[in-house]
Amino acid sequence: MSDQGVPQRFLDLAQRARGPRALSEAGLRERFGDPAQVELEGGQVWRARWEDVSVLVLVLDIGTHEVSAVPVTIDPPGEDENSVVVDGSRTAFGVDVTVWTGLASNIPVRVLERVVDAWGEDLVECTVARIQGRSGPVPAGVSEGLTIRSALEPAAEVRADLADDLEYLRRSPGLPVEEAGQPAETLASLLGDRLDLGSLCTALQLPQPQVMKLLRGKTPLSPDQIDTVASATGLSAEEIACTVRPLPADLVCLAEHPRWRSVWVRRAQRMGVSETQARLSGGYGAFALAARQTGGGPADWEARLRQFLRDEDGAGER
């Protein structure tokens, strides 16, 4: 299941069975609109991906930073005593779909990449009831899964791979977010005895008073400064960013929403960095921009993010 091409193979199989329209790019846009504008809702089936791990999941409930979801598979075939099997006529896939209710869990919103289907309320309610161990009538087109009787059965391997992939998705690194009563570690405390103030001043090309503000977390580091400090100290960019100051919760919710996923992927490709780093430096870039601007009222983080990216693109063209 860790092969990034596997879920695409799911879609290819479904396209051959029912025709390409519903799951083609044109069909998805017709059903759900522009991917950058899609609203995340319960009952949707999403492709969740992080690096080379990709899984199809049915979203059941939506939290601030996570969704409650259950994995679904089409190929390779497999089911267990906790799962339900949905007939192909009930979904856009056109082939039987296994819903692995025994593997229901919370996964980060940031790993959701593309919505590919939306299921009826009866299918969602049946799934939730199965997860909670409640009995009740089974909707039309739904059957209970068969028991796995041996760890050597192919279905047992499918289930084990799904469990591993979900754990990998849960470990995907997120943006540091402000929490009440949780003081952030400063860069000065992180460096400790390794702090070389003169070398940092030289690397950053800043006077000592400004560097001291950065060390104490009083001034947010720009993306370029994060990279400079990383090179000068040998620490990772992620470690350094976390010492500056966690990002406002509203900014983190926006930057990690699936609507922004393609933005960070393209930025990562353009910069030759990981998606994690592209999102991290973009988030702190918008945060630093807001710190330099004046004005009352809550920050419009979407406007800040878009302005930061426009300014970045303009600088690149120059």
Image (cartoon, helix red, strand yellow):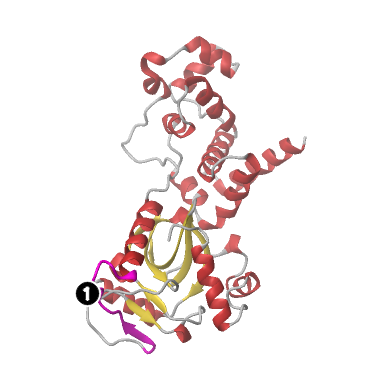
Disc 1, SS: loop
Return the residue found at the far front.
152
| Residue 5 vertical position relative to residue 288 in the rendered view, above or below | below
Instruction: Provide the residue span drawn in magenta.
Output: 140-154
Tell me the kind of residue under disc 1.
Gly
Counting from the top left corner in percent of width and height, residue 282 is at: 57, 41
Determine the image quadrant of residue 313.
top right
x and y percentages locating residue 240 in the rendered image: 45, 29
Q: Residue at x 22, y 74 (%)?
A: 133
Residue at the far right in the pictured view: 318
Residue 17 in view: yes
Q: Is residue 64 visible?
A: no
- The spot of residue 244 in percent (x, y) is 45, 29
Q: Is residue 89 left or right of residue 148?
A: right
Q: For the residue carrying disc 1, how many other residues have a C-alpha within 10 Å: few (<14), some (14-19), or many (20+)?
A: few
Which residue corresponds to the image point at 22% horizontal and 78% vertical from the top-left? 134
Front in this rendered view, residue 41 or 297:
41
Q: Who's the residue at 40% across and 74% down the image? A: 77
Main secondary structure along the magenta-highlighted residues: loop
The residue lying toward the viewer, choosing from 291 and 177, is 177
As drawn, which residue projects farthest toward the top? 198
Membership of 32 in magenta stretch: no
Q: Mark 1 points at which residue?
A: 133
Query: Vertically, is 282 above or below 205?
Result: below
Percent x, y for residue 138? 31, 86
